[in-house]
């Protein structure tokens, strides 16, 4: 029985399937997906459908799911005079900023689905966890997409709302939880200053950063086993 964490797959369905093979995920194992499943890469909706069918996958919200969710509900409606009239400046603004952040592949995949499957995708997105706390082999972990904004100023983790957990880049020079490891995605380790191994899992001050930039040139998909601390990687051209 092993516990794995992965993050920021961003539509890289093929790389994800290779990773499942590589770690040999069994029925007794659990895979936590720390958000940003959708957008950027070529097959985000296929990836969502795959995860939906995996009984041992636990999905945690990312900023890209948050952006998608706001818009997909609207997109799945029939286009009528009434729905067009409801197209507020706010909705249009949200849609535009999502598209500027790589939402195109998610919209394309969503459009290919029938109405029942669209409903299933939206229901699935509604059920994403905001974060998870775990104890594995005596070590405690907080799994969350990005930095919990208020923790450093004393706000309890459980009082954070969705948008307070998915946007902020962690400050790796500070320790958020002295007695727990903070495992996050969101910030590709390619871009972490002073990272001796850009593009691989990064550790400092009880942080474990696992977004290794699967959808970016020079990046790869990473997965970490919490029991053994073993790191697994799938290269972009593997
Ligand atoms: Mn993110």
Image (spheres, rainbow, N blue to C red):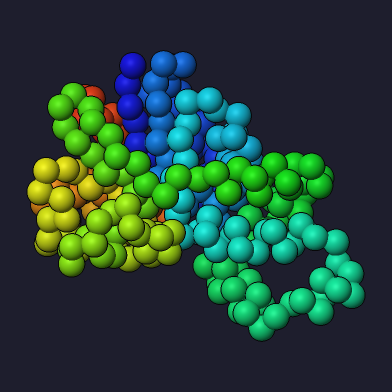
Which residue is at 35% across, 59% downward? 160
User: Please, which residue is most extreme toward the right here?
Assistant: 81
Image quadrant holding the C terminus, namely top left
User: Picture quarter containing residue 180?
Assistant: top left
Q: Nearer the viewer, residue 28 or 17?
A: 28
- Is 36 left, or right, of 43 in this rendering? left
Q: Nearer the viewer, residue 126 or 118?
A: 126
- Is 212 left, or right, of 228 in this rendering? right
Q: Is residue 119 above or below residue 26?
A: below
Which residue is at 32% across, 21% downward? 2
Which residue is at 23% across, 31% downward? 135
User: Picture quarter containing residue 68?
Assistant: bottom right
- Is 26 left, or right, of 98 in this rendering? left
On the image, the x and y values in percent for residue 19 come to: 43, 31
- Is 156 left, or right, of 16 in this rendering? left
Image quadrant holding the N terminus, namely top left
Q: In the rendered image, is residue 191 in sight?
A: no
On the image, the x and y values in percent for residue 93 come to: 61, 79
On the image, the x and y values in percent for residue 62 come to: 45, 54
Q: Is residue 106 above or below residue 3?
A: below
User: Please, which residue is most extreme toward the bottom here?
Assistant: 89
Q: Is residue 56 above or below residue 146?
A: above
Q: Nearer the viewer, residue 56 or 103?
A: 56
Which residue is at 74% across, 77% downward? 87
């Amino acid at each position: 029985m092993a516990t794995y964490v992965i993050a920021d797959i961003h539509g890289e369905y093929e790389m994800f399937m290779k990773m499942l093979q590589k770690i040999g995920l069994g029925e007794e194992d659990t895979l936590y997906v720390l958000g940003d499943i959708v957008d950027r890469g070529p097959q985000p909706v296929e990836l969502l459908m795959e995860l939906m069918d995996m009984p041992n996958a636990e999905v945690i919200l990312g900023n890209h799911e948050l952006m998608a969710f706001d818009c997909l509900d609207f997109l799945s409606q029939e286009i009528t005079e009434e729905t067009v009239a409801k197209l507020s400046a706010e909705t249009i603004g949200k849609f535009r900023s999502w598209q500027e952040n790589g939402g195109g592949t998610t919209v394309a995949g969503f459009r290919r689905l029938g109405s029942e499957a669209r409903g299933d995708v939206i229901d699935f997105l509604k059920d994403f966890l905001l974060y998870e706390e775990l104890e594995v082999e005596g070590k405690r972990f907080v799994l969350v997409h990005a930095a919990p904004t208020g923790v450093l100023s004393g706000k309890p983790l459980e009082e954070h709302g969705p948008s307070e957990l998915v946007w902020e880049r962690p400050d790796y020079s500070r320790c958020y939880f002295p007695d727990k490891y903070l495992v996050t995605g969101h910030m590709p380790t390619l871009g972490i200053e002073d990272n001796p191994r850009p593009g691989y899992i990064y550790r400092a001050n009880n942080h474990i950063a696992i977004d290794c930039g699967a959808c970016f040139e020079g990046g790869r998909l990473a997965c970490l086993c919490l029991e053994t601390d073993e790191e697994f990687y799938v290269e972009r051209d593997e």
